Image: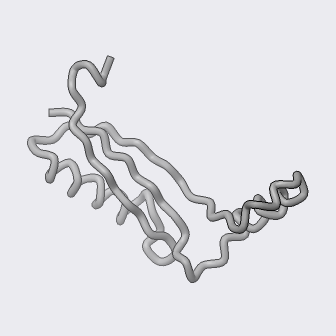
Amino acid sequence: MLFKAKVIVTLRKSILDVQGKAVLHALKSLAYSAVKSVRIGKYIELEIEAQTREAALTLAESACKKLLANPVMEDFEVEVEELTQASTQ
């Protein structure tokens, strides 16, 4: 079966998000005063062939721990869904 893993990687709350602060400053200079904070992260999609959803999730989490996220500075969330013929076309 084919699965899609959606991975969101964000800096841990305790880490200063310099890029987020720069974007917040730029938004305020463009008069978006309603925006009170910005946190920047990464969005990654993986297509995984696995026997079960749980196996695909385990593989995606392993990839995050070893490569996609820096475990010292970043947190990650993984969502896995099965791809059907209709969703792959």
Residue 81 location (% of width, % of height): 25, 41
Q: Quadrant of the C terminus?
A: top left
Q: Is residue 10 above or below residue 54?
A: below
Q: Left or right of 20: which side holds 29?
A: right
Q: In percent of the image, x 40 and y 52: which residue is there?
A: 7
Q: Give the image location of residue 32, x and y in percent.
A: 81, 55
Compared to residue 41, the image places residue 5 above or below, namely above
- What's the residue at 69%, 67% (across, down)? 37
Count every numbered label the image shows and give the total: 0
Indicate the position of residue 61 as horizontal and vertical percent values: 29, 59
Q: Which quadrant, please, contains the N terminus?
A: top left
- The answer to which quarter of the image holds residue 41 is bottom right
Residue depicted at 60% across the width and 79% down the height:
15
Position in image of residue 63 (x %, y %): 33, 56
Name the residue nearer the viewer: 70 or 44: 44
* Between 49 and 26, the one nearer to me in the picture: 26
Residue at screen point 20% across, 33% down: 2
> Seen in the image, is 77 located left or right of residue 12?
left
Residue at the left extreme, as displayed: 51
Query: Left or right: where does residue 50 sit relative to residue 6?
Result: left
* Colouring style: one colour
The image quadrant that residue 88 belongs to is: top left
